[in-house]
Amino acid sequence: MKRRRLAVHEIRTIDIPVPEAVNAEALLKSRLGSKPAADRALLEVMAELGLAPAAPRSVLAAVALARLGGDLDLAARSLSWGDFEDFCAMVVAASGYHVRKNVRLRKPTRQIDIVAESPSLVLAIDCKNWRRGVGPASLEPAALAQTERTRMLREKAAAPQRKAYLPVLLTVLDSQVRVLSGVPVVPLHGLKEFLASVNPFEDSFSFVVG
């Protein structure tokens, strides 16, 4: 049997649908069934965290989804790094801390996303908008690196302070606070509670003291 060859003009193309960009607000609306319900959930998160209306809605939606048990992996994909960092800084500031963003250290050059200071504590926070699947093997090096940056921050302080310095990793996807190498790994939706309870006498944390 002879095989028939397709002429050039007979070649057909197949259109492959491109999935729409993932959007945390859309996920929240789908989960709650309507836009008004999603808007109410955003307002509840905003009020609970003491945030102004300028807070990024995409991150508010991610927090709301976390509390509903939604798919945080999808929600995390919709968050820009800038929005995530801005939101974290807003939550920390609303909890009574003095906040500085993107603090640069020199010799060697290092950067800390958020430095938050209270009368007794200085938190050196690294914002990690990771996707699902990040386990202890990946978190351990990040925890150790943040500890070293925190030590540098303490050593390079303009004036000696009798405060405890604590390295912190802040993520979207974790379900609860974990501690790796003495560094708390805090989920975004549990940040306010963590800030209200953390103290320099917590034995499981690796504080850097002067």
Image (cartoon, rainbow, N blue to C red):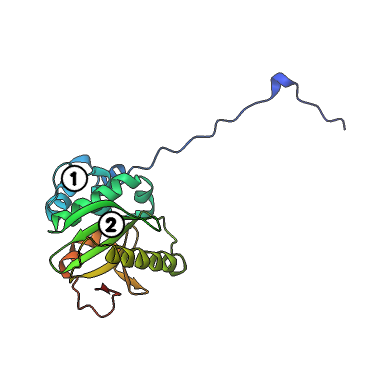
Q: What is the quadrant of the N terminus in the image?
A: top right
**Residue sitting at 27 percent across and 66 percent down?**
154
Q: Can residue 140 be seen in this view?
A: yes
43 sits to left or right of 127: left
Please provide percent x and percent y for residue 182.
Answer: 33, 74
Q: Quick one: 120 or 190, which is closer to the camera?
A: 120
Give the residue furthest to the right.
1
Question: Which mark, residue 37?
Answer: 1
Disc 2: which residue: 66
Measured along the vertical axis of the image, is residue 45 above or below residue 140?
Answer: above
Q: How crowded is mark 2: few (under 14 residues within 10 Å), some or many (20 or more)?
A: many
Q: Which mark is residue 94?
A: none
Q: Give the x, y percent position of residue 108.
A: 40, 58
Q: Residue at x 35, y 68 (%)?
A: 147
Q: Between residues 71 and 210, which one lies in front from this camera angle?
A: 210
Q: Which residue is drawn at 27% across and 58% down?
A: 188
* Distance from the alpha carbon under mark 2 to that under mark 1: 16 Å
Q: Which corner quadrant holds the C terminus? A: bottom left
Please indicate, yes or no, whether residue 31 appears anywhere in the rendered image: no
Q: What residue type is labelled 2?
A: Ala
